[in-house]
Image (cartoon, rainbow, N blue to C red):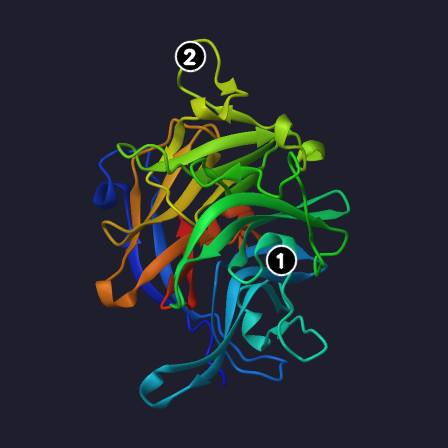
Amino acid sequence: MKILLFLWVPVFFCSAARAQKSPEDPSFSVKYGGAMLDSGKSAFTVIGFGGNYSLADSGKIYFFANDIWLGEILAGGKKGLEGVVDSSLIVYPSTSPYAMKEGVSYLFDENNWPLPLITADFKEYSGIRKFWVRSPVKIGNGYYVFYSIMNNYGRGLYDYFRVGQGVAYSEKISGPYKKAASGGRNSFWNDIEPAFGEAVLHDLDGWLYVYGKNPGNPYRKGASLARVRPADILKRERYSYYTEDYDKKKWTDDITEASVALEGADEEFSVSYNRHLKKYLAVYFDADSQTVFLKTSPYPWGKWSAPVRIKVCVKDEFCYGAKEQLPLSEAEGKKIFITLGKKHMPYLYEVEFR
């Protein structure tokens, strides 16, 4: 089964005057590219995948998927689900978004089934636990991926809740990935602490900035920010956290003092430095308004601009998880590419700044 990829269709042109009244807001056009699904070189039919965090390596784009759905497309376009593989890779053969339609491939196990990157053992309640990959990053010759630890509470496909965040590492992008330990446990952060790893920025200043949804502030929805030196990514005690609790310092070792650094961002978003805009760029989906927004800032921690609208979803689209795919950007960020999940399928959008 294949779906035609990337028939680029103009959606709209957004000027600063139209989207926001600030003259500093960027102007841009948006084109719709299509669904990112192709059965590719596989012995099974992929009917959907989620997560969609990308990393370029050896001339290819690797999409780290929370899960891959296997099954068949039924009459009327409905999906017949036969199985789910958590935390796996989808490999696109080119770093050009316009050449990705040539086909994708997957990593297989000995049974020709998608290969999970992170697995549970018997000590980790393997019957009720799964791992969802988040942001990957390459440091030196090693590969690292943040992940969410999920526990099951029912029989439904989505009957899972997050109980922590961790970091895993491998010498090869294809894995296997080993979970790093902190204090004898794989969880670096627990369920009431920010879900660090939703977005990762390897900045020019030498720091690794790690963003995550903050569940502890009911009055200010958004993401908190941690930072660590790349060499210390596997050392939980070396992370510090952005805080607004003090007048003379921005970083604290006490995670309970972590502030919301990026308002509005929830789960599955992105932060990058855009050379064309000469600003940091955040892309996220706001579930309340069903809108994809972007924000800009002079620093990784803000102050962030007011949100600028990229796309509005209708309720029946079931949108989620908008993020920039940095490996696909062109002309130093003048043209970027965003994925948006709809009904467990990523769709690609081209955003070109003026």
Q: Which mark is residue 246?
A: 2
* Vertical side of 56 occupied by 2: above or below: below
Residue furthest out toward the top: 248
* Vertical side of 148 occupied by 59: above or below: below
Real-space Cα distance between discs 2 and 1?
Answer: 40 Å
Secondary element type, mark 2: loop
Residue at image mark 1 = 120
* Residue type beneath disc 2: Tyr
**Percent x, y for residue 126?**
58, 60
* Residue type beneath disc 1: Ala
Q: Residue at x 24, y 49 (%)?
A: 288
For marks 2 and 1, give the one nearer the viewer.
1
**Percent x, y for residue 307?**
30, 40
* Vertical side of 234 occupied by 288: above or below: below
Question: Which of 350/162 is in front?
Answer: 162
**Residue 298 shows up from this direction:** yes
Disc 1 crowd, CA 10 A, few/some/many (<14, 14-19, 20+): some
Closer to the N terminus: mark 2 or mark 1? 1
**Percent x, y for residue 189?**
53, 37
Disc 2 crowd, CA 10 A, few/some/many (<14, 14-19, 20+): few
